[in-house]
Structure formats: C-alpha cells, structure tokens
Image (cartoon, rainbow, N blue to C red):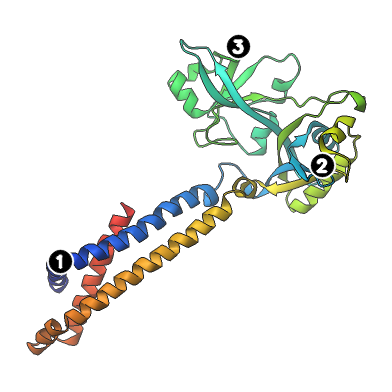
Amino acid sequence: MNDLARDVRQALRAMARQRGFTVAALVSLALGIGANTALFSVTYGVLLRPLPYADTDRLVRLSEHHPGANAPVRTLLSKLTFHAWSDSAPRTLDGLAAYRGGTLLETSGREAARIAGVAVSPSLFALVGARPAAGRLLLPEDAAPGAEAVVVLSDSLWRERFGGEASAIGRSLTLDGRPRTIVGVAPAEFYFPSREVRLWTPLSVPRGSADPARQSIEVFSALGRLRPGATVAQASAEGTGAARSVTRPPLAETIFGEGGPVEVRAEILLDAITAQVRPALLVLMGGVGCVLLICCANVANLLLSRGVARQRELAVRAAIGASSGRLARQLVTESLLLSGVGGALGLA
C-alpha cells in the first residue's frame, strides 16, 4: 500500500508539472466519454428501457394499410375492422382495445387548465397488466350508453391536484364542461400511450349504421396482446381476414381510391414506438463511438509523445537503481489516474 500511495503521489506531481499535456488528455477523454454517456442515456430511455406493461413482447400496435389506393396509405384501425375482429373471437389475440388521445379543458379549479388525456377501451388496462394505486381502473360498464361519466387520474395529477389524498376518489373533475367522477389512480410508474398523458376516460367504439351507404369512416389507435405462441404475421393475417369480411362504405373509395383490399398489420409495440427514431439514434451512436475512438487515439499519441520526452528521465531513474518493473508500474499508475479523472469528468 505504501508503494501504491507513493506511485499515486508521483503521478500527481508529474501531471502537475506537465499541465498542457494533462489538460489536453483530460479534455479529450471528457469530451469523448461525456458525448457517449449523454447519447447512451437518450438511447436507453427511447430504445432499451422496458415499457411499464406486462408481457411487452406480446403487445402489438394494429393499423390498416391500403396498398391499392391512389397512393399507399397507412391509417389507424377503422371501427368496422375493430368490431369485425372483436366479434370473431380472435385466435391470435388475448384482447383488443382502442384509444384516442386529445387535450381536455379542466375547469374544476379557480383557473382553467388544459390536460393531456386519452379515451380508452376499459379493457386496455387489463391488456397491459395495470393495477390501480387507489380506487379502481375502468370497467366495461363505464363505456356503456348512459353510464356515469368517470375518469382515472395519473399519479402525478392526483398528487398535484389532490395532494395524494385517498379522499380524491369519488370527487368530481370537470373536463370540457362535463363533470366526471374520479374512480381511481394509476400507478406512479404507469403511462399510456406517452408520459404526457395525465388522465384516462372510457371509450366506446361506435358500430355505426347497418347500411353501408350511410356508414361513416371512423378510425382509432388500437392495441392487442398476442396469445402465447401466436406471431405478428399470424395476427396480421387474422386481422386482414376480419377487415375484408365487412362491406366497406362508398366513402372509403372516395377517401382511398379504388384498388386492392385493405390489409391489417400488427407490430410489436416497442418497435412501432421507436421505428421513426431508431435509425437516427443508431447513426448518432455510431458517430459518437467514432468520436470516442478519435479521442482515445489522441490521448494515446499524447502518451507516446510524453514517453519519448521522458526517455532521459527514465534512464536516470534506472541508473540509480529503479527496476524495469518499478518504472512500468509508475507509468501504468499515471495512465490509470489520467483515465480515471478523465472518465469522472465525462460522467459528471
């Protein structure tokens, strides 16, 4: 331990004597490591951090595609496809839920405020394995015609507006001029479909008119959960079959043009969420990786130049009795100390 302490003191003195070399090396390491650390944090948060749901590898986002249209079009899931698939007792899905986001005007307090909210099928919470932190989550009867207007709050909104008090359950929140009874609070770690959403209301997907000529086109974001053993391709094929089993209204041709039949595609939820940003983040990761390599190469060149400049010093120390092992240990200690300080600066 005494030898190690002496090596560290000598390394610190050597770094202090050659301040230009020390600053250049530390700046190179700090920039390279800092850039990689910052980008990895972003990449982990976007691409690698698991979603706060159960069985995330089985959750799929569902969409319709119209490859025969005047131009290929991807849309959300239509109400016709949603009901046709739900009513057919899907073999590939454990459940199917629709949702639609928006901003609601909350006027319960002294000042009006806009809050990001999502209307969801009550089955969605069970689909993602959510459990209430207080009260209950949405039930199927909450979306029934004539049902009492209810709302589920996020943990952050519950604490912000009601101080996290259990007495908030049963109180009223006026959203877009309509009073809604607070029935529950979602867990603190839960969000859907994004972290900005702070409340959820029940959604009922309308069936519309039985007459195709009078049928409207209405679309929703949709989420499903694959049955164990089912694949994305199988779910896509089953959804496509359900979509083609119903008569499309004339309005569909007006919007999409004449052409091939509709296709339904299922995508693993995490892949669907990150599809647009994944290529850019991977390119950036490669770029900052190259920056780190360049910084390390610069430091290596600085160390080599410094080693050449210290040849006489090392020769004198060897002449007065320092062994080659002792000299090597001193040089390694200096390099490790430099790397440690540079790494700490990069992580700071």
* Front residue (pair 228, 262): 262
* Front residue (pair 151, 134): 151
Q: Amino acid at mark 3?
A: Gly
193 vs 15, left or right, is: right
28 vs 7, left or right, is: right
Q: Position of residue 294 (x, y in %)?
A: 38, 68
Front of the two marks 1 and 2: 1
Alpha carbon of mark 2 to alpha carbon of mark 3: how far? 38 Å
In this figure, which residue is indicated by the disc labeled 1?
12
Q: Position of residue 338 (x, y in %)?
A: 24, 66
Q: Amino acid at mark 2?
A: Pro
In this figure, which residue is indicated by the disc labeled 3?
177
Q: Quadrant of residue 123?
A: top right
* Front residue (pair 205, 115): 115
Q: Position of residue 307 (x, y in %)?
A: 21, 79
In the structure shown, which secondary structural element does the residue marked by tag 1 occupy? helix
Quadrant holding the N terminus: bottom left
Residue 230 visible, this orientation = no
Q: Amino acid at mark 1?
A: Leu
Q: Residue furthest bottom?
A: 319
Residue 120, compared with residue 31, is above or below; it is above
Q: Position of residue 43 (x, y in %)?
A: 49, 52
In the structure shown, which secondary structural element does the residue marked by tag 3 occupy? loop
In this figure, which residue is indicated by the disc labeled 2?
90
Residue name at image x 21 percent, y 76 percent: 306
Q: Residue furthest left?
A: 320
- Sequence-wise, the earlier of marks 1 and 2 is 1
Alpha carbon of mark 3 to alpha carbon of mark 1: how far? 69 Å
Residue 257, compared with residue 122, is above or below; it is below
- Sequence-wise, the earlier of marks 2 and 3 is 2
Residue name at image x 81 percent, y 29 percent: 217
